[in-house]
Amino acid sequence: MSREDYRSFLNQSASEHFVKACHGGYKSVPFGLSRATYILHVFSKARFPIYDSNTHSGICLLTHGRYHGWGIPKTKSKDPDWYLGKFCAIIADLQQQCAVHDNASRREVDKALFQYGKWEPRHD
């Protein structure tokens, strides 16, 4: 598949709706880029990283908001092009630095980044 195919898949999946229970009944909500990247992660056998608010925050913390001259937004992007072009490149570089070569190790990087992104520095 080409990058355009992946972008189309992410756009299509992210725009799908599902029914969510809420106070007073149910509502239809969009699937979103985070869930779409999880599906891509599973079907690609971990070739593509999981992207959510925690992994995004983890990358921001690790890079101090800049990477190879790119600015990294403080909040999670909803743009599949940003995910495919920048986030995946940052993760690939991180995996290379960590000598990651198999799916189990890729998953460990995802989990570590998720946990790191949950950390909030103290401002004493």
Image: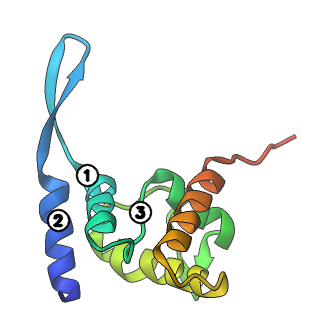
x, y (%) of residue 102?
A: 50, 79
x, y (%) of residue 77?
A: 38, 61
N-term-proximal mark, 1 vs 3: 1
Q: Residue at x 19, y 89 (%)?
A: 2
The amino acid pointed to by label 2 is: Asn
In the image, is 73 to the left or to the right of 64?
Answer: left
Q: Which mark is residue 32?
A: 1
The amino acid pointed to by label 1 is: Gly
* Local SS, label 2: helix
* Local SS, label 3: loop
Gap in Å between the C-alphas at discs 3 and 2? 15 Å
Q: Residues within 10 Å of mark 1 (few under 14, many from 20)?
A: some
Question: Which is closer to the viewer, label 1 or label 3?
Answer: 3
* Local SS, label 1: helix
Establish if 92 lies above or below 20.
Answer: below
x, y (%) of residue 98?
A: 66, 81
Q: Which of the 4 image quarters holds residue 45? A: bottom left
> Which quadrant is the C terminus positioned in?
top right
Q: From this viewpoint, is residue 74 visible?
A: no
N-term-proximal mark, 3 vs 2: 2
- Name the residue beneath numbered marker 2: 11
Q: Residue furthest right?
A: 124
Q: Residue at x 43, y 55 (%)?
A: 52
Gap in Å between the C-alphas at discs 1 and 3? 13 Å
The amino acid pointed to by label 3 is: Ile
Establish if 22 lies above or below 3.
Answer: above
- Name the residue beneath numbered marker 3: 50
Question: Which is closer to the viewer, label 3 or label 2?
Answer: 3
In the image, is 62 to the left or to the right of 37?
Answer: right
